[in-house]
Image (cartoon, helix red, strand yellow):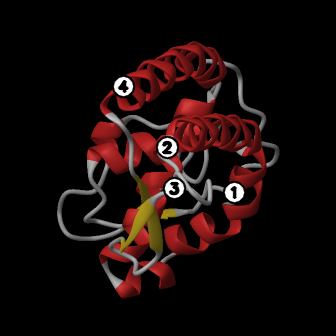
Amino acid sequence: MSLTLQNLIEYSNTAYNFLRKKRENADTKLGYAINRMGKPVEKALKPYKELLEEQQVEVDEINIRNASTDKTTGVLIYDTAKDEQGKETRNYKYTPENLVKRNKEIREVLKTYEAKVETLLESPATLNNPYFCTEIPSDLTVQEQEAFAGIVISTMNVSSAPTNGESKKVLEVV
């Protein structure tokens, strides 16, 4: 199975949610396989993360360039707020003209990066030595199976997933 960075992002998000869904999921054979593949998947996603970080740096610079400053000291004007994780964030203040300019510049940066990201997401992802689990938990959804296929579950027919409440041995190996 050929993987793209988009496949790895879907896998990564699905794996994270699977492990958080129930504490005992981490103790299954699938949970073990997901944890074992954590570092290789992270390494394969490195170009994507670097591109997003580069984009964020440009957006941050646009925000600072267009933010209002104190007339006497030249210091940026902002207030702070805490996000959902309790992390403090800066909310810069803008004049109406600078806000319009800022938004236009950010849209241009996002368009530029959108094309780069789309190209990157379709590029082949190299994931050496996938580790396949030997049992599929009975409550694994079709979406989860599709996201895990080729990474921690061997390529298989989705209809062969267990439906009777028992784990099923994966017989097909790539």
**Which is more foreground, mark 1 or mark 3?**
3
Q: Nearer the viewer, residue 12 or 94?
A: 94
Q: Could you classify mark 2 by the number of other residues whose Cα lies within 10 Å: few (under 14), some (14-19), or many (20 or more)?
A: many
Q: Earlier in the sequence, mark 1 or mark 4?
A: 4
Q: Secondary structure at mark 1?
A: loop
Please give the residue where the numbered disc 2 appears in the rendered image.
67
Q: Nearer the viewer, residue 14 or 62?
A: 62
Question: What amino acid is found at the position of numbered circle 1 in the picture?
Answer: Tyr
Question: What amino acid is found at the position of numbered circle 3 in the picture?
Answer: Asp
Q: Is residue 83 visible?
A: yes
Q: CA distance from mark 4 to mark 2?
A: 11 Å
Q: Quadrant of residue 8?
A: top right
Q: Nearer the viewer, residue 23 or 172?
A: 23
Question: What amino acid is found at the position of numbered circle 4 in the picture?
Answer: Glu
Please give the residue where the numbered disc 4 appears in the rendered image.
97
Q: Earlier in the sequence, mark 1 or mark 2?
A: 2
- 3 shown above or below 150: above
- How many marks the image carries: the answer is 4
Q: Quadrant of residue 119?
A: top right
Q: Are marks 3 and 4 in contact (CB under 8 Å)?
A: no
Please give the residue where the numbered disc 1 appears in the rendered image.
131
Question: What amino acid is found at the position of numbered circle 2 in the picture?
Answer: Ala
Q: Are marks 3 and 2 in contact (CB under 8 Å)?
A: no
**Which is more foreground, mark 3 or mark 2?**
3
Q: Residue 57: x, y in percent?
A: 67, 42
Please give the residue where the numbered disc 3 appears in the rendered image.
70
Q: CA distance from mark 1 to mark 3?
A: 57 Å
Q: CA distance from mark 1 to mark 4?
A: 55 Å
- 106 shown above or below 44: above
